[in-house]
Image (cartoon, coloured by chain):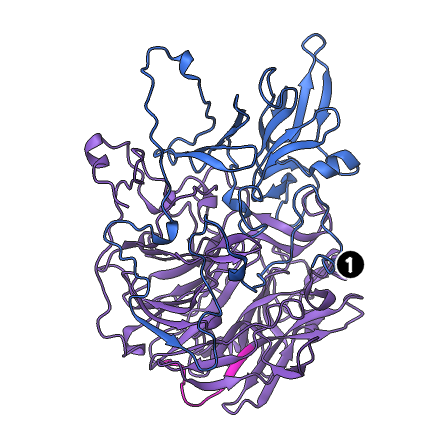
């Protein structure tokens, strides 16, 4: 099994004949099953989930995004190289027969507002994905140097940021069972509880909140706008902001962009 | 790039010797917020919106008291108000148009969005000898108008309308983009895409936000006009269209587009762009090299924000400054990722460009690569954002989608950085986005008597309680070190 990053192709080759016996891409349009899958851009680390591991028999891959594929020259892409561009990544677990997506981790599952913050899950230059025996998934985000483990319900239960990612992108990471390294003593478990980023400061930086004047404006409810207490905590729907943002909606991957958004809310 | 779950907020870097010291205002999730250099909140006009907020001399702020219900209007502000230090509204305008929304009494609204200017200052930010007026003068507003134009599309359009009003709120001048369709430079492919898909947004049953103009300012006094180039008359207006990738200057007197870049950023094509010698010229931008090995050629400005002319008296005066977002923008050929031809141009990194409007030579830029980063997506905001030239030659950049406001030297060093700690909730998710921030000189806010100028030195390492690892931080904030020893881990800070 292989993936061709520059051409947006995922394939299985027969070891006996050398023939490509199964292929996804490079064109994902004009086929209802691949259209539903959405365009895969610059794929990486594709593999079949091994027997005995949850999801066995499915394909697991990093749909990296960034730039990939060859096509007709257009506007800013004068040579037709890298015509497909997307500013976020997807982890896809695919049934290789039906092409149905069985499980995914995209910016949506990561908790980001799409399309505005989609790029906050974006591993374009490399990265990897590994299914773990307990059904969790280990993901390496290369450019950020972030390696993290998510549950089937998409909760992050472990996260590590490599201190040297600028020099050495984390192109892959593998979680190894303790038994493989009998030379090491069993490490002790110490939980790391993340702080609330709203209050998290570098040394010497004041919290600053409410340090000065708080002014009520004529005729304006001072609580009309509300900040959430913890951006990763439970979000109270009463704090919902009424804003529209500066973009036309973009349909999630796998859903064709609608001709009109008028019925979407 | 991806984001870790944990990173510090507030001021993360502050070098008092090299920064331009003043106060910073931005629209936050709590209201219009004014902070000092150390990150102390010196004033919050609670609940006041701002699209954007701007400070006037004397400690006044401009903003809005609310937005129209998104079900009925897209990004329409109810009004534009001037509020004094103590919260009193001293000036208000809401007279652009009378609207009748379901469930509401008929009412007059400003329908303002994205920008406005008060007479006296071309851009609303500090420049020597050009202070915005506080008790008189004209105000320029960028507003919306719904309109049908069958030659463009069969769908209802949300057009952009510029209005100038006097102090009493009387509209004395207006300009509508749809009246200048033939001057915008669209090719036939683009016209066809716009006809079918004019960037529909749901408000009011569906309306085409076809241009999404998101900045509007005066040129102000400049060397080009002084040398006889009428295109740069100080009264002329400069603006950009986010959805169409157009940057333009219009004549205040005739309304005509007299200078334009985009929507097609290639060598001049007489068939598309008109005869050589026409006033609307279109050339290829002469870019500086991008310091990265993996960068595709990027002649296009995409989804840009805050195009303006650097005001007289500031370093770089007369050049144009723009936050070229990348992200997505433009109408063009269908691709796999853009199956309708909407948002046909994409680029997953941002750059700030300063360029000469006559030669189109880029004279300064800020990208992640210029800042020494390997990955260009480390500096990226696909929407909102801005750039302000400061009197000491530094540039204040709002990387809006990251809630990051930072000041860089001409050599791309970060001498001040602030991460907005306030998140709003949106469909069960959270964002700390900052639309646009401005640095304000102390003398504009005499009420603030003791702002902090205590340096904030970014640490070599920062640990989460319980963790003995290098920080899970916004990695570009901190110079990356080798893994530190047990001793430095003892310096854990929360």
Q: Secondary structure at mark 1?
A: helix
Q: Nearer the viewer, residue B487 or A75?
A: B487
Q: Nearer the viewer, residue B87 or A245?
A: B87
Image x and y of residue B140, in percent: 53, 80
- State the residue at coordinates (79%, 38%): A30
Answer whether residue B375 is visible to the viewer in this image: yes
Q: Is residue B384 left or right of residue B391?
A: right
Main secondary structure along the magenta-highlighted residues:
loop
* B6 vs A178: above or below: below
Q: Residue at x 50, y 83 (%)?
A: B139
Residue B220, position as x, y percentages in the image: 45, 78
Give the color of chain B as drawn: purple
- Give the tally of numbered discs: 1
Residue at x 59%, y 17% (from the top left corner):
A50
Residue furthest top as drawn: A16
Question: Left or right of B55: which side holds B279?
Answer: right
Give the camera-side residue of B80 and B376: B80
Query: Badge 1: how crowded within 10 Å, few (<14), some, or many (20+)?
Result: some
Q: Colour of chain A?
A: blue
Residue A224 pos. (x, y %)? 49, 70
Q: Quadrant of residue A168?
A: top left
Give the camera-side residue of B118 and A196.
A196
In the rendered view, would you say A123 is above or below B382? above
Q: Is residue B114 magenta?
A: no
Specify the subunit that label 1 lies on: B
Is residue B372 in view from this perspective? no
Could you tell me residue A9's position as x and y percent? 66, 28
Queried whether the magenta region covers residue B132, the answer comes back as yes
Residue at the spot 23% in from the left edge and 60% down from the top edge: B16
Tell me where the magenta segment starts and ends, as one range: B130-141
Residue on which disc 1 sits: B196
State the image quarter where residue A40 is shown. top right
């Amino acid at each position: 099994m292989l993936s061709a990053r520059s051409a947006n192709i995922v394939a299985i080759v027969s070891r006996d004949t050398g023939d490509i016996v199964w292929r996804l891409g490079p064109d994902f349009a004009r086929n209802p099953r691949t259209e539903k899958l959405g365009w895969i851009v610059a794929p990486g680390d594709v593999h079949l989930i091994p027997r005995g591991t949850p999801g066995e028999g499915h394909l697991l891959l990093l749909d990296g995004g960034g730039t990939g594929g060859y096509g007709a020259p257009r506007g800013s892409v004068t040579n037709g190289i890298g015509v497909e561009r997307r500013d976020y990544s997807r982890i896809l677990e695919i049934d290789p027969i039906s092409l149905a997506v069985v499980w995914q981790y995209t910016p949506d599952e990561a908790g980001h507002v799409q399309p505005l913050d989609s790029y906050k899950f974006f591993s374009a230059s490399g990265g990897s994905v590994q299914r773990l025996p307990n059904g969790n998934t280990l993901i390496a985000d290369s450019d950020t140097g972030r390696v993290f483990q998510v549950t089937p319900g998409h909760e992050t239960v472990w996260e590590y940021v490599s201190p040297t990612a600028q020099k050495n992108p984390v192109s892959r990471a593998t979680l190894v069972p303790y038994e493989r390294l009998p030379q090491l003593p069993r490490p002790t478990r110490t939980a790391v509880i993340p702080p609330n980023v709203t209050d998290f400061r570098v040394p010497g930086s004041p919290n600053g909140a409410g340090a000065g004047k708080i002014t009520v404006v004529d005729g304006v409810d001072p609580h009309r706008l509300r900040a959430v207490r913890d951006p990763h905590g439970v979000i109270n729907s009463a704090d919902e902001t009424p804003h529209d943002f500066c973009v036309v909606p973009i349909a999630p991957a796998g859903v064709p962009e609608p001709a009109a958004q008028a019925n979407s809310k | 790039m991806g984001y870790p779950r944990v990173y510090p907020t507030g001021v993360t870097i502050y070098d008092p010797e090299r920064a331009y010291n003043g106060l910073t205002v931005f629209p936050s999730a709590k209201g219009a917020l004014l902070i000092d250099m150390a990150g102390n909140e010196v004033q919050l006009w609670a609940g006041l919106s701002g699209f954007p907020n701007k400070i006037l001399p004397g400690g006044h702020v401009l903003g809005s008291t609310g937005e129209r219900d998104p079900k009925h209007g897209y990004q329409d502000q109810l009004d534009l108000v001037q509020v004094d230090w103590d919260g009193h509204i001293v000036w208000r305008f809401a007279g652009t148009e009378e609207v009748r929304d379901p469930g509401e009494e008929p009412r007059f609204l400003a329908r303002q969005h994205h920008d406005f200017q008060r007479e006296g200052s071309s851009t609303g930010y500090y420049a020597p000898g050009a202070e915005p007026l506080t008790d008189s003068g004209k105000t320029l507003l960028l507003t919306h108008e719904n309109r049908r134009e069958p030659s463009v599309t069969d769908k209802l359009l949300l057009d952009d309308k510029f209005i100038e009003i006097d102090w009493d709120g009387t509209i004395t001048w207006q300009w509508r983009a749809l009246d200048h369709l033939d001057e915008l430079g669209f090719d036939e492919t683009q016209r066809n895409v716009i006809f079918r898909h004019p960037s529909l947004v749901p408000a009011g049953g569906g309306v085409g936000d076809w241009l999404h103009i998101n900045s509007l300012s005066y040129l102000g006094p400049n060397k080009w006009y002084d040398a006889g180039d009428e295109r740069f008359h100080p009264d002329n207006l400069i603006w950009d269209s986010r959805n169409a990738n157009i940057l333009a200057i219009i004549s205040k007197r005739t309304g005509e587009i007299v200078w334009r870049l985009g929507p097609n950023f290639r060598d001049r094509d007489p068939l598309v762009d008109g005869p050589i010698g026409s006033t609307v010229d279109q050339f290829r931008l002469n870019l500086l090299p991008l310091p990265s090995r993996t960068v595709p050629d990027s002649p296009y400005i995409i989804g840009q924000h805050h195009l303006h002319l650097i005001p007289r008296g500031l370093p770089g005066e007369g050049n144009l400054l723009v936050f070229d977002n990348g992200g997505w923008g433009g109408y063009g050929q269908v691709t796999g990722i853009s199956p309708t031809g909407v948002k046909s141009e994409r680029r997953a990194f941002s750059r700030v460009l300063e360029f000469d409007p006559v030669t189109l030579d880029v004279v300064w830029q800020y990208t992640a690569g210029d800042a020494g980063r390997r990955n260009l997506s480390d500096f990226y905001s696909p929407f909102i954002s801005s750039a302000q030239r400061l009197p000491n030659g530094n540039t204040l950049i709002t990387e809006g989608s990251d809630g990051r406001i930072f000041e860089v030297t001409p050599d791309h060093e970060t001498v001040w950085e602030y991460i907005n700690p306030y998140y709003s909730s949106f469909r069960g998710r959270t964002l700390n986005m900052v639309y646009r921030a401005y640095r304000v000189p102390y003398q504009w806010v005499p009420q603030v008597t003791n702002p902090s100028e205590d340096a904030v030195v970014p640490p070599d390492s920062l640990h989460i309680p319980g963790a003995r690892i290098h920080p899970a931080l916004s990695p570009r904030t901190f110079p990356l070190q080798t893994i530190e020893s047990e001793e430095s881990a003892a310096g854990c800070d929360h």
